[in-house]
Image (cartoon, rainbow, N blue to C red):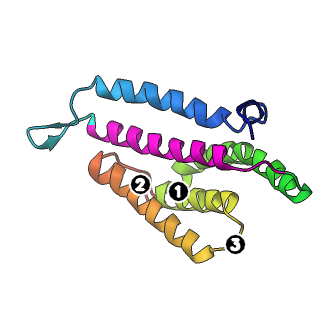
């Protein structure tokens, strides 16, 4: 599929927007100073690490967009129509997550949110054990990142 076709069907819109935002974020993080000073992490370490991970993820998405062959059969078109609603579902799930976060706490809200995203972008219940393990790992890593590394108190269901 040619670049103009990819531009018209909107598949490049979100990755390019994220690339621009991540680049701005990266520039701001670089202005905070070096990520490591005297063998210790500084305030710019995590923002730079997050920006680097985002750059890798965006590169992977762009690679897949440009490697995808042209869809010609009807089933591929219906699958593509389903995928176009993905951003709408992500926005809805994110809004619900933000709303639920303070009421049901980090662990429950994040686990439900991450699992819903894996179901949305995966192939339904296919690979369910892997999705459950990934949900658990992402939820725990997020907790460790904020509570331990950033020392930010997250809301819990029991508090």
Residue at the spot 65% in from the left edge and 45% down from the top edge: 65
- Is residue 139 toward the left or the right of residue 146 in the image? right
Of 82 and 137, the residue lying toward us: 82
Whether 24 is among the magenta residues is no
Asked whether the residues under the numbered discs 1 and 2 touch, taking CB atoms below 8 Å apart as contact, a structural biologist would say: yes
Q: Position of residue 128 (x, y in %)?
A: 62, 74
Task: Return the residue at label 2.
Answer: 142
How far apart are the two marked residues, 2 and 3, measured between alpha carbons?
Answer: 24 Å
For the C terminus, the image quarter is: bottom left
Q: Position of residue 70 (x, y in %)?
A: 78, 48
Residue at the spot 40% in from the left edge and 38% down from the top edge: 51
Query: Residue 74 occupies which quadrant of the picture?
Result: bottom right
Residue at the spot 74% in from the left edge and 36% down from the top edge: 2
Segment tinted magenta in the rendering: 45-71
Asked whether the residues under the numbered discs 2 and 3 touch, taking CB atoms below 8 Å apart as contact, a structural biologist would say: no
Task: Return the residue at label 1.
Answer: 110
Residue at the spot 44% in from the left edge and 65% down from the top edge: 137
Q: Earlier in the sequence, mark 1 or mark 2?
A: 1
Q: Earlier in the sequence, mark 2 or mark 3?
A: 3
Q: Which mark is residue 125?
A: 3
Q: Main secondary structure of the magenta part?
A: helix
């Amino acid at each position: 599929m040619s670049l103009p076709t990819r531009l018209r069907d909107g598949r490049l819109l979100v990755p390019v927007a994220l690339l621009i935002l991540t680049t701005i974020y990266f520039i701001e993080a670089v202005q905070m100073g070096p990520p490591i000073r005297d063998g210790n992490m500084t305030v710019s370490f995590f923002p730079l690490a997050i920006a680097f991970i985002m750059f890798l993820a965006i590169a992977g998405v762009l690679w897949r967009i440009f490697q995808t062959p042209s869809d010609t059969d009807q089933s591929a078109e219906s699958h593509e129509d389903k995928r176009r609603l993905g951003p709408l579902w992500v926005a809805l799930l994110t809004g619900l997550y933000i709303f639920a976060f303070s009421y049901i706490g980090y662990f429950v809200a994040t686990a439900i949110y991450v699992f819903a995203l894996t179901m949305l972008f995966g192939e339904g219940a296919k690979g369910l054990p892997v999705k459950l393990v990934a949900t658990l790992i992402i939820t725990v890593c997020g907790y460790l990142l904020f509570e331990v590394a950033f020392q930010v108190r997250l809301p819990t269901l029991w508090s």
